[in-house]
Image: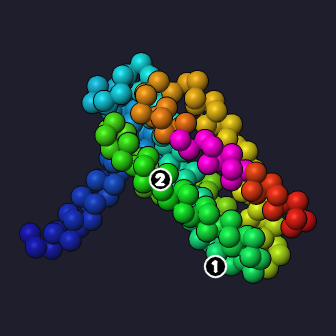
Amino acid sequence: MKKFFPFMGLALIWVGSGCSGPTTKDSTAAADSVNTAKIDSGSSKVASSTAEEDSQFAVKAANGGMAEVELGQLAQEKSKDARVKSFGAMMVADHSKANDELKALATSKNITLPAAPGEDEQKLKADLSEKSGKDFDKAYIEAMLKDHQKDVKEFEDARSKVKDPDLLTFIDKTLPVLKKHLQHVETISKEIK
């Protein structure tokens, strides 16, 4: 019987891993899946008719915010340009604050947020990590310009779609900050060419 124990353990691990379903490295997809399950089961505190759009917005906002912090830290480490370093510091400070507010709000609404930035954001960070000097600065600022254009549009769109009043307050508070970031990065983009 003792000779079968190691094989039984391996068999249980194999069977257990096969039954758990597909795994994903993208924590945003995982968070969306958890939120959908909560809504379907009725355990979300947000009204079920609007909960899916509200939770999807929260997941996107959290994903973007975490990525901004990580990329801002990278800019502070890798850039030699004072403007880029300063912008990176602003990203870390402003998005850390917004992330903390969103986490508290999501907890109160029983919304699951991603634990880490999604695959696309991780790929961008990896790509930027391989660059240095002016190549890094240009690529980082270009990424921030595109990202903040997208963020401002998503927050403006969410303003008319999100129904939860607390999430709307978060949007109203955060949107002017995102617009300020966009203006700032537009200026840097023109100067760095």
Q: Which mark is residue 62?
A: none
**Placement of the N terminus among the 4 image quadrants:** bottom left
Q: Residue at x 63, y 43 (%)?
A: 176
| Residue 131 in view of the camera | no
Q: Residue at x 47, y 53 (%)?
A: 99
Q: Residues within 10 Å of mark 1 (few under 14, many from 20)?
A: few
Distance in Å between CA atoms under marks 1 and 2:
21 Å
Q: Is residue 78 visible?
A: yes
Left-right relation of 128 to 7: right
Q: Is residue 120 magenta?
A: no
Residue 179 image offset from top left, x and y in percent: 68, 45
Which of 66 and 123 lies nearest the eye of the viewer?
66
Task: Locate residue 109: give its quadrant.
Answer: top left
Q: Amino acid at mark 1?
A: Glu
Quadrant of the frame with the C terminus:
bottom right
Asked which quadrant contains residue 106, the reply is: top left
Q: Residue furthest top?
A: 49
Which one is earlier in the sequence, the residue at label 1 or at label 2?
1
Q: Which residues are magenta?
A: 173-182
SS at circle 2: helix
Q: Position of residue 184 (x, y in %)?
A: 75, 56
Which amino acid type corresponds to the residue marked 2 in the rendered image?
Asn
State the scheme by which the image is colored. rainbow
On the image, the x and y values in percent for residue 15 come to 29, 53
Q: Which residue is mark 1?
A: 77
Q: Residue at x 49, y 39 (%)?
A: 170
Task: Examine the residues drawn in magenta and state their main secondary structure.
Answer: helix
Q: Which residue is mark 2?
A: 99
Q: Nearer the viewer, residue 172 or 153?
A: 172
Q: Is residue 132 left or right of residue 156?
A: right
